[in-house]
Amino acid sequence: METVTLTMKDQPGLYLEADSITPDAFAGKKAEEIVDLPVYTGREQHRLGDFFEVSGTAGATPAETKIVVNGDISRVKYIGMKMTDGEVVANGNADMYVGAWMQGGKITVNGNVDAFAGTGMKGGEIIINGNAGNYLGAAYRGDWRGMAGGKIVVKGNAGSDLGTFMTGGEIVVGGDVDVHVATHAEGGKIVIKGNAKRRLGGQMVEGEIYVFGNIDVMMPGFAYREDVDVEVDGVKGRFALYEGDLGERHRKRKGQAIYAKLYQLVGA
Amino acid sequence: MTKTVTDVVCPFCGTLCDDLEVVVSDDGKDLLEVYNACAIGAEKFLHSQAKDRITRPRMRQEDGSWKEISYDEAAEYTARILADAKKPLMYGWSSTNCEAQSIGSEIGEAVGAVMDNTATVCHGTSLIAVQDIGIPSCTLGEVKNRADRILFWGCNPAHAHPRHMSRYSIFPRGFFTGKGHAGRKIIVVDPRVTDTAHVADVHLQIEQGHDYELLDAFRVAFKGEKLPDFVAGIPKEKIYEVAETLKSGRFAIIFFGMGVTQSIGKNHNIDAAIAVTRDLNEYTKAAIMPMRGHYNVTGSGQVWGWQFGFPFAVDLSRGFARYNPGETTSNDLLRRDEVDAVFVLGSDPGAHFPFSSVKKIYNLPSVAIDPHETPTTEVCKVHVPVAFVGVEVGGCAYRMDNVPIETRKVVDAPEGMMTDEEFLKRVFARVKAIKGV
């Protein structure tokens, strides 16, 4: 795997829309070609090289390309957007839309990400070694298909609207989450190792939520069924199983409605 | 002698009352009296007659004082800041007519602006929910003539839309609602005992910020599933009872306001309320309607929906329309320093935005186009006073139920004043000249 290193040299006046920072856009290009890739601030088009020092050479295909982004990238949007393969390592806090609509490959962020990371994600892996903002792995506005596949792991906390309209894939949050988890979800799995606040699984059709810590307020549409022994993300434990959202529509199998499942850890 | 103009449309709130009578002087220059309007609407008409009204554009000087400038100079400044900016914000649009909104959209497209209206701090969240799950709605005429179950959720029309209750929702006798108030059941959901709650048959005094849970509880109750003993501070027996009341009606309507659109959960609250309405349609006829605030905020959503496909927070900076509230909404843009010029028309963000956002406006090249002196004109570099739409110039406006109503001119604007539309046309001509298109 060949590595291209980007180092931020000049901050944009506003925010930088850099949807060209992907192994797909870099593949088969030398550093002097990569600097010419387009980026935008507001309505102005610039070159990637206007803001970043570029060194190294990309591999022949996305799968053989690794991108390392260094420097203060807190005003850079769309890192790894729509990537299909390869690897991106962002060393610092990244702005919105990290790995949005990602289809494959791996993104590692050694810092925090702002909102809309993994929006409409279909495959691949995002590792966030800091905190994530709102709308992690959610659907884009108006879309009824959120994250459909792949895996997102957050070491720290995540914001609100986690996994809205999720249909598949897995999100693991090491810390706490804000309100609205898996709203409208029709599949997928969300593991919260810390505490959750309120509105877990509102309007949820199918899918699974696991919470290791506290839940401030349980949705009235979730009913307690039984205690079950489950192993999740390498942790074995006894979980209280709730099913819901009873107010929402549910498909039936053999005459039985299939509900979304919410597991809360009650004992090791 | 005076003359009375009848069937005047009130340009204050989204109810857009169309039965006002206005007495004007014989020469049509002075507006003397207003009949049938609420206190706020009447004041809007009478305020146009203020003797200390500002009638010429003015520019802020280094020492903080104002200097009078011509409309041409104001148009030049406005065109220049919009054309020079990488990403200007063009905000407001709710207290003007659709004709002005349409020209504003053309300017926005030419300069690559972010177009946002007052829905961004009001019913924008409702629009997100509508896009997510659709909306079964109706007109206010249907409410008056058919509705016998009226639910006000997080809104207080007694103060915000004063004639709504008498014209449409509680008191009027309609075609199938001949008993008026007596034939209707009024339910109010509000954490406070508002004046609207005083006229309700049932007031659910919900715990603040638990609307989503209570809406979900109604859906559970409709399906006859079990509820916890209390939801949002309301005992389950009460929830089952109200659910039955709603189901037993011939026509249920839910009106909702900023108590749910701007409290925790925002669009999700409306999403759940729409789901409740949809569920009710399994048992009876039900509809839901946002209590839109400004008289033509609905119209700006209509104009942009038609021109760009999105009703607010439209980012045109890359030459195509993008829409993602949370990123392209005014306060997020200002808070994050994502815009480098601010244009305000027909709105008062100085009074309604968080102070941190207002400070950002103060620090940027900025222009406010507004008939009044407002907190916004105080923080902007240039203030362009214009004629009052619906008083001194007519034009199309959309009522809260998306019905377009042509507003009427009743008096002349002070000598030499421009309208929003005229001023924007002049700005657009200058923008085209600067851009060479």
Image: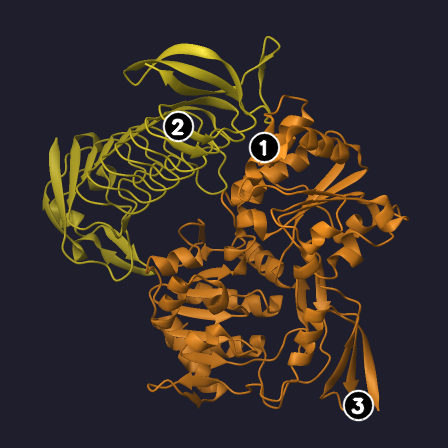
Q: Are marks 3 and 2 on the same chain?
A: no
Residue that appears at 37% across and 63% down: B356
- Give the labeled residue for mark 3: B26
Q: Are marks 2 and 1 on the same chain?
A: no
Q: Residues within 10 Å of mark 2 (few under 14, many from 20)?
A: some
Does residue A176 appear to the left or right of A140 in the view shown?
left
Disc 1 is placed on an element classified as: strand
Where does residue B256 sit, x and y in percent of width and height? 64, 48
Disc 3 is placed on an element classified as: loop
Chain identifier for the orange-coloured part of the image = B
Residue that appears at 58% across and 59% down: B303
Does residue B381 appear to the left or right of B162 in the view shown?
left
Please state which of residues B207 and A65 is positioned toward the viewer in this rendering: B207
Marks 1 and 3 close (CB-CB < 8 Å): no
Residue A14 to residue B71: above or below? above
* Residue A128 visible in the shown view: yes
Residue B60 to residue B302: above or below? below
Q: Chain A hue?
A: yellow
Quadrant placement of the N terminus of chain B: bottom right
Does residue B242 appear to the left or right of B117 in the view shown?
right
Q: To which chain does the residue with label 2 belong? A: A
- Give the labeled residue for mark 1: B231
Marks 1 and 3, how far apart in space?
A: 61 Å
